[in-house]
Amino acid sequence: MRPTELLLDPSLRLGCAALLTAAYAGVCGAVNWRERYRRKARTALARAGADSPAWLVLYASQTGAAEQMALETARHLHQAGLAAQVLELNQLSARQLQTTERALFIASTCGEGDVPDNGALFATQQMAQALALPNLHFAVLALGDDSYAKHCAFGRALDAWLNDCGAQAMAPRIEMNRGNAEALSAWQALLTHLAGSSDAPDWTAPDFQTWRLVERACLNPGSQGAPLYEITLMPAAGALPDWASGDLAQVQLAADPGRPREYSIASLPAEGALRLLVRLHRDANGVNGLGSGWFAEAEIGSHIPLRVRPHRLFRLGPNARRPLILIGNGSGLAGLRAHIKAREQSGCGDNWLIYGERNAAHDAIWAPELEGWRDAGMLKRLDRVFSRDGQGPRYVQDVLRDSADLLRHWVDEGAAIYVCGSRQGMAQDVDAALNAALGEAGLASLALAGRYRRDVY
């Protein structure tokens, strides 16, 4: 299957996982990954160079690496006196692209060729047609992970489509796998050349800090599935950093330091510790995964390099006061639990949690807390689905199908939908169920408005 055909396959629409962890390590620069920087950067870029020809800096990003690189790219153009506008690819219309003279595309690929959610509409709509782009000058940076056969597939397909549309490449496509330093340097050198500046930008990644394993508890003893651990961590020295619900913890492992592992944070700083929900992964030979194996086997008190990484695309953000429909399975409950805790702190009780696991007898993860939230009115509805109980398998997508009228009512009342958990199976089937209930155009509209957000892996 050619890359373009892959990207336009409806079964892959919005199908992406948070798997580009390494790209962050070489990209997410001296900025401190805080919303304060983002606001300042966007304000400065909006004010910059009003009389200069505009550049578009366009990105498709699932976990934030490409987005951060787009902000850094635009910041460098601004410092050189050039006006630059940063947009998600989904925000780009065909007309706007046809009237643009200069555009820089930063496109992530997730797993085996999947398109990030905020680029999926562009891929299925704009890239499905042959636009005439003779006036467009462009460059493409493709982010990926070369442990996958179809790494950088979206960036490659985008580059090919732009060439087919008659656009003029200002430089050959640059591919950056796992935050490759040489590719990063090549992009920085290209920016320096295009901007006519003399100093290359410095995008040094923030350092990992030493954290201590404080506590570990297996939450599913006797389960048919792999062990699921609640992990509690504290900085070895100093105070807890700040983070928001939806954010991620990156850990660096001695056996593979160039490829940090990422985990959804289940707690908030106000709770006094950083908590994770980690499923032990074993390969076909029964060998434990490096990250999950460390969390499952390390002695209490052991140290690990860790840094908190904001995940803006899965934060509550403008949805903080909306009703929320939270959908997930397995260890995906971590990110959803943090969102419910944040809603509890702000007094927002319009929450509906749909969560799937295997058996009620062994996999009722955090049941007392979830039931307490339900009884207190913090969860207006709690649907826990156990696939190995009852007459036949039942999954979270079955709840959506059976509750389609209620789902539409919540969405009509302004609800946002957050999905966290496994990409294969759950996230794909949830997407199909939402399409059936809301219509493809309706779900696409929610995604474009930021009311359909996913952290899937």
Image (spheres, rainbow, N blue to C red):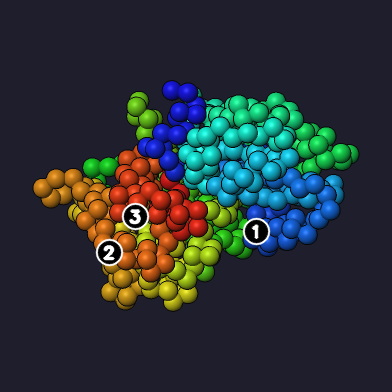
Q: CA distance from mark 2 to mark 1?
A: 36 Å
- Mark in the foreground, 1 or 3: 3
The residue identified by callout 3 is 438
- Quarter that holds the C terminus: top left
The residue identified by callout 2 is 406
Q: Quadrant of residue 102?
A: top right
In this rendering, the count of numbered labels is: 3
Q: CA distance from mark 3 to mark 2?
A: 11 Å
- Quarter that holds the N terminus: top left
Give the residue type that dot 2 points to. Leu
Local SS, label 3 = helix
Q: Position of residue 358 (x, y in %)?
A: 24, 47
State yes or no: discs 3 and 2 in contact (Cβ < 8 Å). Answer: no
Residue 450 visible in the shown view: yes
First of labels 2, 1 by sequence position: 1
Residue at horizontal 66 percent and vertical 28 percent from the top: 166
Q: Position of residue 441 (x, y in %)?
A: 41, 51
The residue identified by callout 1 is 34
Residue 272 visible in the shown view: no
Residue at horizontal 50 percent and vertical 35 percent from the top: 128
Q: Position of residue 241 (x, y in %)?
A: 60, 60
